[in-house]
Image: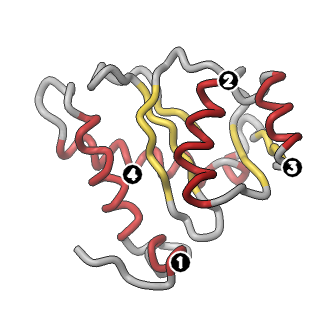
């Protein structure tokens, strides 16, 4: 899990929470606020990840205060989710999400308006495009790896 932050305001959002399944490589892009709290993060996680995909075995994140907060730690502990914090300057622990962030930023760069205030409307299409494209490491799309079928365009 990672945040892309300090984006121009779009539909009252200024950040994107990026969640990547390390097995299928499927990504979820969730509009968020830069001032998000641990409680907000838990609600977003339950609404967008847990309710649709179940609980993960572990979560890899950076050491942003939100991910190391007492509340988030207790929540993961109660749900029996292992928290793996990435180490600075070791991309092998966190590089997958950083690469997805780069892809998302490229998708948005191609489609947002000149004022860059409509990125929110492009998030679902960027998520579909990413998840429908062949992944270089698996040679399959994340949709195929996750659902065992190709998605229709």
Q: Secondary structure at mark 4?
A: helix
Residue occupying the point 27% across, 54% down: 125
Q: Residue 56: horizontal and vertical position, in percent?
A: 72, 56
- Vertical comparison of 146 with 129: above or below: below
Marks 1 and 3: CB-CB under 8 Å? no
Q: Residue 144: horizontal and vertical position, in percent?
A: 46, 79
Looking at the rendering, which quadrant does residue 69 occupy?
Answer: top right
Label ID, residue 145: 1
Residue occupying the point 53% across, 78% down: 145
Quadrant of the snapshot with the C terminus: bottom left
Residue occupying the point 43% across, 84% down: 149
Distance between the Cα atoms at labels 4 and 2? 26 Å
Q: Residue 104: horizontal and vertical position, in percent?
A: 38, 47
Q: Earlier in the sequence, mark 2 or mark 1?
A: 2
Distance between the Cα atoms at labels 1 and 3? 25 Å
Q: Secondary structure at mark 2?
A: helix
Q: Earlier in the sequence, mark 2 or mark 3?
A: 2
In depth, the one of 17 and 100 nearer the eye is: 17
Q: Earlier in the sequence, mark 1 or mark 3?
A: 3
Distance between the Cα atoms at labels 2 and 3? 17 Å
Count of labels in the image: 4
Label ID, residue 38: 2
Q: Earlier in the sequence, mark 1 or mark 4?
A: 4
Marks 1 and 4: CB-CB under 8 Å? no
Label ID, residue 80: 3
In depth, the one of 118 and 91 nearer the eye is: 118
């Amino acid at each position: 899990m990672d945040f892309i932050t300090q984006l121009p305001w779009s539909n009252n959002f200024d950040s994107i929470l990026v969640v990547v399944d390390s097995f299928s490589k499927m990504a979820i892009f969730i509009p968020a606020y830069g001032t998000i709290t641990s409680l907000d993060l838990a609600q977003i996680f339950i609404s967008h990840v847990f309710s649709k995909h179940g609980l993960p075995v572990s979560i890899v994140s950076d050491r942003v205060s939100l991910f190391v907060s007492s509340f988030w730690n207790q929540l993961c502990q109660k749900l029996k989710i292992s928290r793996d914090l990435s180490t600075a300057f070791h991309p092998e622990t966190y590089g997958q999400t950083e690469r997805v962030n780069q892809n998302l930023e490229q998708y948005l760069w191609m489609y947002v308006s000149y004022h860059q205030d409509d990125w929110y409307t492009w998030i679902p299409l960027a998520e579909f495009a990413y998840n429908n494209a062949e992944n270089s490491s698996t040679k399959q799309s994340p949709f195929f790896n996750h659902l065992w079928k190709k998605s229709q365009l």
